[in-house]
Image (spheres, rainbow, N blue to C red):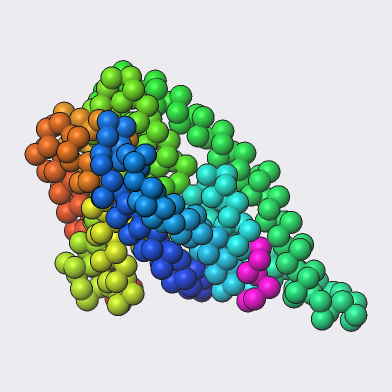
Amino acid sequence: MKEFIVKHKQYLLSGVSFAIPFIACGGILIAAAIALAPMGATGPDFSNSPKLQVILDIGVTSFKLMLPVLAGYISYAIAGKPGLVAGFIGGFLSGEINAGFLGALLAGIIAGHIVNLIKKLPVPKILKPVMPILIIPIISSLAIGILMMKVIGVPIADFMVFLGEWLKGLSAGNAVVLAVLLGAMIAFDMGGPVNKAAFFFGAAMIKEGNAFVMGSVAAAICTPPLGMGLATLLGRKMWDEQEKEAGIAALGMGLMGITEGAIPFAASDPFRVIPCIMVGSITAAVIAMLGKAQDHAPHGGPIVLPVVDNKILYVIAILCGTFVTAVLINLVKKITSAKKGA
């Protein structure tokens, strides 16, 4: 079991190392476009800024490519070159069906193992030369495509509908409970379907005349990347050089309200990182809700400060969430590393 976990962690790290440049490129370009665009009542307004719109579109494209690259190179790490096609297709479909980075991780792992299974099948000698360039890519792509579109995608779509209805039922209840749920959902999959359900709920509530919900969501959005970035600065010895570089990029994306900046950390170490960033985002969401911070734009992070009411409480919420995330993940790494060494 231990060998299985270690091997799969290496597979995930391999995918992450290829995906980081796409996350950094997309995040920085999107952040730059948002930072330079005028902020309207409905968020950044690109209607009179065609050049910024081009920069935004290129950044969004880089983000869209991130999921196929992540899944493709996880599959490549498991099965070698024949695993690339199925991994890329599985990752692309993960984005299309709103399965997010968690879906891409799953797609990459499943695709790699499907390819390895196909490799073991007995085939006539005449077919062996075309197996890696034709037969394996076609069969494995069909398999992962059907799994993503017909098996994994359906429950995710149903889950999204369920979450939306569930949140509507909670909106009239305890505000703190709602903030806890929204904070946890925002950090759980960092841009995935659960994150989007919470975000769109907050955005929809603005139109209903309630900007408190979006204020809570907006404070939670930026703390995963900010917290992970701060963690790499506070505990330099705990993080390798690649993670420290990802931490700097994460800080930049966090300031612009781009939750995906924490994905490199969560993808390589999901069981320690995801719970910690969820606690940090919950902290920020609850403080913002209690502080009655209102965000009138459907975006998050410090960048929307001009359209936020109760700005001081909003900033305090972000700082507390960021600090909680950073301290918690460093503490968890220290404790678990000490146990491994014992």
Horizontal side of 147 relative to 241 (left or right) equals right
Residue at horizontal 67 percent and vertical 50 percent from the top: 147
- The C terminus - image quarter: bottom left
Check the image and report above or below for 62 versus 236: above
Q: Is residue 81 a member of the stretch shown in magenta? A: yes
Q: Is residue 43 above or below residue 127?
A: above
In the image, what residue occupies the spot 19% across and 58% down? Answer: 327
Question: Residue at the location (22% across, 46% down)?
Answer: 303
In this view of the protein, can residue 61 be seen by the observer?
Answer: yes
Q: Is residue 283 left or right of residue 92?
A: left
- Is residue 241 positioned above or below 204 on the image? below
Task: Give how far across and how far down residue 149 sits, in percent.
Answer: 66, 46
Q: Nearer the viewer, residue 55 or 5?
A: 55
Point out residue 140 in the picture as x, y percentages from the top left corner: 72, 62
Which residue ends up furthest to the left in the rendered image? 312
Which quarter of the figure has residue 120? Answer: bottom right
Residue 188 part of the magenta-drawn span: no
Q: Which residues fall within the magenta stretch?
A: 80-86
Foreground residue among 133 and 40 = 40
Residue 113 appears left or right of 49: right
The secondary structure that most of the magenta stretch takes on is helix
